[in-house]
Image (cartoon, rainbow, N blue to C red):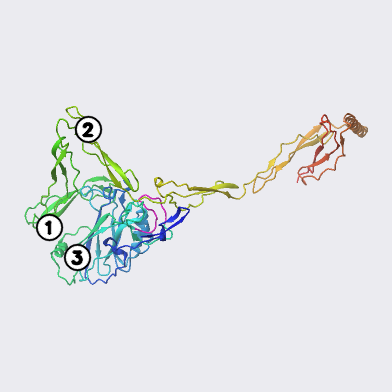
Amino acid sequence: LYRASIVQKRIIYFQDEGSLTKKICEQDSASEGVTDKPILDCCACGTAKYRLTFYGNWSEKTHPKDFPRRTNHWSAIIGSSHSKNYILWEYGGYASEGVKQVAELGSPVKMEEEIRQQSDEVLTVIKAKAQWPAWQPLNVRAAPSAEFSVDRHRHLMSFLTMLGPSPDWNVGLSAEDLCTKDCGWVQKVVQDLIPWDAGTDSGVSYESPNKPTVPQEKIRPLTSLDHPQSPFYDPEGGSIKLVARVVIERIARKGEQCNIVPDNIDDIVADLAPEEKEEDDTPETCIYSNWSPWSACSSSTCEKGKRMRQRMLKAQLDLSVPCPDTQDFQPCMGPGCSDEDGSTCMMSDWITWSPCSVSCGMGTRSRERYVKQFPEDGSMCKVPTEETEKCIVNEECSPSSCLVTEWGEWDECSASCGTGMKRRHRMIKMTPADGSMCKAETTEAEKCMMPECHTIPCLLSPWSEWSDCSVTCGKGMRTRQRMLKSAAELGDCNEELEQAEKCMLPECPIDCELTEWSQWSECNTSCGKGHMIRTRMIKIEPQFGGTACPETVQRTKCRVRKCLRGPGMEKRRWKEAREKRRSEQAKKNIDSEQYPVCRLKPWTAWTECSTLCGGGIQERYMMVKKRSKSTQFTSCKDKKELRACNVHPC
């Protein structure tokens, strides 16, 4: 690996990302498909029928790092037998939308649609059910399988299934050629599988959040050096543990064959094997248990007999749809009559050892395993299912020795990187009979190695996009973040992980604001019917689409004493007005005598009316001309008068 970093002031801005890392890999068998291999024309005759069986080997036991206990599964298998003119997927190519949906979502719907659109280049669509959880013993759940056919034109086979949950990881075969150079059909293919990356999501672990790869990258096999957080990471760069195995077996040939090499016994036996149904025709409304293992053959000689397997009908969701039989029969012969070695037992792994039979000194312990699948020829299994061995507990059994339990499991390593320590413990079951102190150790420690620590403490991700502004209008704030990619315990990092800045959006609407209503004016007539008005002022004009101002003048009716009629009426009015003017003038004279030092200028002219119609306001002012410096004359102030104007309706 050739790695590059961009460093400034001891802070890593980018390291090992994208084109900053270049790999040169030794090719191994697991990545044979990375390089182009020429696909030859097929010269075989007739057709051949195959059965694909998928054996998942991905579990917490085989791949313990970050294993997703609750959601682990294999998605539904999807594929086809096809010609060389159509490729479902290939290393170094780009994933189609169908491959992307399998890789990211585990959905085969789009992939099947793409396959069926290539009907001239496809012979059989290959489908098998999903597996939840990813691994179970074969005596609990049979391995998923599917059957397909090939011919001279469509002699290639491809399939894929998602390893879930994962960003975009799959396993599968691409353009596996089942035609031999001798114009025959391959008898059997066994291929171990490692996961590959579809190049559509940049997550690094099983449950990484969605992070689309832009631009899309090419399909490539995963390696043990992809990323330190990868569940397959190995600092030594070793090969990835295999996660699955696929077995493709030929089960029949049809039509005239033209293979150059004569058939061997395996070819003949395979063609004589009974064909099973091409597809599982069990209705979706019938819910069954898994098939039981096959029973022993009913014949102990070379005469043909039968063997049986059973399943249980758990539920019938639609009573109008009949459910198939719960028993299945198959022809068989007695032991030693088959041309194939049918006497092989398929066994489970050994179960853990039992506790030692004694608490002091030498004893025995045992472990067991069970038969996963009985021999196909109906014979009994001769492989041992139990074994024993000697064990020693508390080697000294003298009165001064004490009894202790067996050692427990090792604790986790004390360091997350570099060299640490791990410990395990045991307990004292019984103190020495002579009353002395127990000399047996109850704690044991040893060194443990974790992946190498980073030497530079700050390994930061790029800044995220700016967040939305904190307000919907006017001035606000927005933020962005970045993450500390190196573990905190590897060193202090004082770099900021969040930034904030001001943001400006269009101005917020400003509504109209008004003063309170004034007092009602006097009635505009001295007798009879008239009207009074009151007004209010605009404090803030509406802006940026704010609420408009309502009315600023209101008018109401008023009624004064009845008007008197007669020749002396006008004369009386004139007399009253004259008396009023005289009284006002006398009041002004008194004010000027009381406050001889407060002199006012004459009233200014009335201002223009604030509106042309509907009621407006006019103002005039009387300004102080000379004001006493003494503080006792507080009433010497500028004066202001208001009156209504243009009160006629608009």
**Quadrant of the rendered image containing residue 151:** bottom left
Number of the front mark, 3 or 2: 2
Task: Tell me which segment is drawn in magenta.
Answer: 197-212
Which mark, residue 253?
A: 3
Counting labels gives: 3
- The alpha-carbon separation of the residues under discs 1 and 3 comes to 22 Å
Q: Are marks 1 and 3 in contact (CB under 8 Å)?
A: no
- Residue 551 visible in the shown view: no
**Quadrant of the rendered image containing residue 249:** bottom left
What amino acid is found at the position of numbered circle 1 in the picture? Asp
What amino acid is found at the position of numbered circle 3 in the picture? Arg
Number of the front mark, 1 or 3: 1
- The alpha-carbon separation of the residues under discs 3 and 2 comes to 68 Å
Q: How dense is the environment of label 1, judged by Cα within 10 Å: few (below 14), some, or many (20 and up)?
A: few
| Residue at mark 1 | 341
What amino acid is found at the position of numbered circle 2 in the picture? Ile
- Residue 494 visible in the shown view: yes
Whole-percent x and y of residue 527?
84, 33
**Is 584 included in the stretch rendered in magenta?**
no
204 to the left or right of 194: right
600 is higher (above) or lower (below) than 435: below
Earlier sequence position, callout 1 versus callout 2: 1
Whole-percent x and y of residue 455?
39, 51
Number of the front mark, 1 or 2: 2
Q: Are marks 1 and 2 in contact (CB under 8 Å)?
A: no
| Residue at mark 2 | 428
